[in-house]
Structure formats: structure tokens, C-alpha cells
Amino acid sequence: MASSLLPSEFWWFALRRATDVSNYLPLKLNGKLTTPHELVYDNKPDMRNLIPLFSSVAYPEYKSASSLDTHLCRATLVGRSGKKYALEFYHPSTKRIITTATYKLDPRHTTAGPEFGLSYDGGLFF
């Protein structure tokens, strides 16, 4: 979060991601190496889901409500969707989440906050 200079409204995505990653960490149960993900879903975790969040500008493909044409928009990756192979992207100008499996990442931009004009507010306070 801090390295991407994003405001605290993105903490939900960061906490959800931390939970996902912790479920991929191996543990030993009855002398056998496994993961919490494997115990719940009875299959090995897919490491392709470990794409770094907030780390770059993305161009997800979406369909507009007014036409059947597909478009690309500028967004940042915020998580994995419950749909198979789909990811969630935050589109700052509309403040909407776009869920798609078709996207391009632009690694030239490494801090999502300044790229979208979002102000870093120092993080989460209790």
C-alpha cells in the first residue's frame, strides 16, 4: 500500500489479498506438507494468482452498457475475482470495479496512486 502511495480506501483490497496469500503458505499437518487452501478446496493453489496488486497501471477490457463493443480503460489491479481466472481492477475516474480475465499490465508505471491522482494519506489509523 505505502509503496504504491494509495489512500486508505484501498486497505480492504490489501487485507483481502493478505488473507489470500496466507492461505497459500505451506504448513505441516499430520507429517504432511499442505496449505490451508488445499485443505478447504481439495486442490493445490494456483500460483498464477499471485500477481502483485497496485504495482502497475493496467488496461482491463470491458463491455460498455450502451453497446456490445469492448473497450480498454486505465485502471489498477486490486484483486482476484471469485470467478475463475478473472481479476478485479479499480477504475478511478468512475470509482467502479471492473471484473475481467482480459487485460494488459503496463510495468512502466510502478506507483498507482500518483498515476491516478490519488493522494496517499499515510495509511490506516485506529
Image: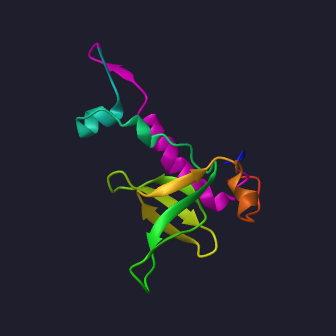
Q: Position of residue 2 (x, y in %)?
A: 72, 47
User: How was this image coloured?
Assistant: rainbow
Q: Give the side of residue 47 with respect to residue 2, left or right.
A: left
In the figure, 42 relative to 89: above or below? above
Residue 125 seen by the camera = no
Magenta-highlighted residues = 4-31
For residue 73, what is the image quadrant? bottom right
Question: Is 67 in front, or is 9?
Answer: 67
For residue 63, what is the image quadrant? bottom left
Q: Residue furthest top?
A: 31
Question: What is the total number of numbered labels drawn onto the structure image?
Answer: 0
Q: Position of residue 104 (x, y in %)?
A: 53, 54
Q: Residue at x 71, y 64 (%)?
A: 116
Q: Residue furthest bottom?
A: 66
Residue 46 seen by the camera = yes
Q: Residue at x 43, y 63 (%)?
A: 99
In the figure, 24 relative to 112: above or below? above
Q: Is residue 25 found inside the magenta-colored segment of the image?
A: yes
Q: Residue at x 48, y 40 (%)?
A: 50
Q: Position of residue 27 (x, y in %)?
A: 38, 22
Q: Position of residue 37 (x, y in %)?
A: 33, 36
